[in-house]
Amino acid sequence: MTVTLSPSRRSFLGLAAGAGLATTARATDLPKFPSRPKTSLKALAENEDYWARIAAFYSVTDAITNIENGYWGIMAAPVMHAYRRHTERVNRENTYYARGALSDDLKSVYARLSAFLGVSADELLLTRGASEALQLLIGGYNTLKPGDAILYADLDYSAMKSAMDWLAERRGVEVIKITLPEPATRENIIDAYARAFAEHPNLKMTLVTHVNNLTGLIHPVKEIATLAKSHGADVILDSAHALGQIDFDLLGLGVDFIGFNLHKWIGAPIGCGLIYIRKDRIRHIDRFMNEPGDDDDIHARAHLGTLNFAAHLSIPAAIDFHEAIGAQAKEARLRYLRNLWVHEARKIPGIDILTPDDPSMVAALTSFRLKNRTTTEDNNAIVRELAEEHGLFSVRRTGPTAGDCVRITPALYNSAADVRRLAPALRALT
Ligand SMILES: Cc1ncc(COP(=O)(O)O)c(C=O)c1O
């Protein structure tokens, strides 16, 4: 069946105008996008009718209530539609497409990302995910000299800590490891980095995680980046969880090297990550394994081979859907859902909530720890009980120095009623 769409509808669905494709997917089956009520952001975040209409764009299993949406973010219907359509095209047109029109189509994806992020397309490089993006940045970082030091914190992502250890061995530099304070505040997190810079004048690069995956804390990136700059040091920013979950201005962060995910909170198909390197810093990441290209060519910083082209081609559809809701509205809704369970859970004796309520420090993700239940086995048992006794799917996290915890991550398809079920379940656990 051939679907004919109006130009605006085409653009909303992220479909390349003029592609002239027949498709079995039916765009007409998609729900109508709701118009946004003219209310304050707070009232919008609490408007269950509006969010139920957004939730209608997601097809979700009813086997369990999933409040573990930190792994990745499922696609909304228009993104699925675009992804199916691109997959059909790649499969049907085969190498004729991949060796032909694909190149221009990918240029359009870069142009969309460039406009979305407010940076130049030649400062961006698509990857398969944030892991690949950050490993390329950390592994290729080439300005260190023996005697220098690099830093990471307990709350950073484990694969990135390993990459930092590998970098230190490769360049003959020292690794400084810090433990971030619990409970965290904006001030004590900044202080932890300030102390490290004061104590280690040889500190030349620090990994910073924008929104960490263990507790959900949003780190004061701009302040840490300013601090690093004042000590002649760089930040490599792990922004895997930030883009699409919280509203921020990339250039305003003051960071030259960033790894993003597009398959978490932007909702692109699995297999979409992104590197940003400020143009005049590209030379400070090595060319990948003698990849041809000059000092300023970001595409020489990786060799990704044959990719899931359809996933990358669907990124504009995901950005369209993200923008149709609006970054601020998404952030406010996610934080509202988080607050609904956290405010109740704080009243239960024996539960520590591992993120502060300061809205600049938290959005969707938040972990809790039951007192004296800090082992992996303890927390696996809590996750099991929440699933088996209460039908709520969560995940254990290992990594914070103070012990394991359980992470709760609502998504846009969750209702207030979904997350309200958590506090009574936690009461039953304690
Ligand atoms: C903080 C952080 N960094 C990096 C990653 C890696 O992302 P991906 O597995 O999508 O490559 C994750 C994944 O959860 C993460 O939470």
Image (cartoon, grey):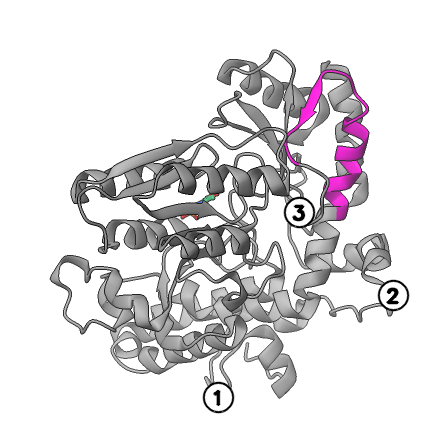
Q: Which amino acid does label 2 sit on?
A: Thr
Judge the density around disc 3: few (<14), some (14-19), many (≥20) Cα neighbours within 10 Å: many
Of tags 1 and 3, the one toward the viewer is 3
Judge the density around disc 1: few (<14), some (14-19), many (≥20) Cα neighbours within 10 Å: few
Q: Report which residue position mark 2 lands on.
A: 39
What residue is shown at x 67% (from left), y 70% (from top)?
324
* x, y percent for residue 66: 64, 38
Q: Compared with residue 127, is residue 167 higher up or lower down, i.e. above or below?
A: above
Q: Give the range drawn in magenta.
A: 336-355
Judge the density around disc 2: few (<14), some (14-19), many (≥20) Cα neighbours within 10 Å: few
Q: Compared with residue 14, is residue 378 higher up or lower down, i.e. above or below?
A: above
**Occupied quadrant, residue 140:** bottom left
Left or right, 194 with reference to 278: right
Helix, strand or loop at label 1? It is loop
What residue is shown at x 39% (from left), y 39% (from top)?
152
Q: Is residue 127 visible?
A: yes
Lower position in the chain sequence, tag 1 or tag 3: 1
Q: Which residue lies furthest to the top in this view?
A: 372
Left or right, 400 with reference to 170: right
Question: What separation in Å lies between label 2 and label 3 (alpha carbons)?
Answer: 21 Å
* x, y percent for residue 345: 77, 27
Instruction: Residue 422: say if magenta.
Output: no
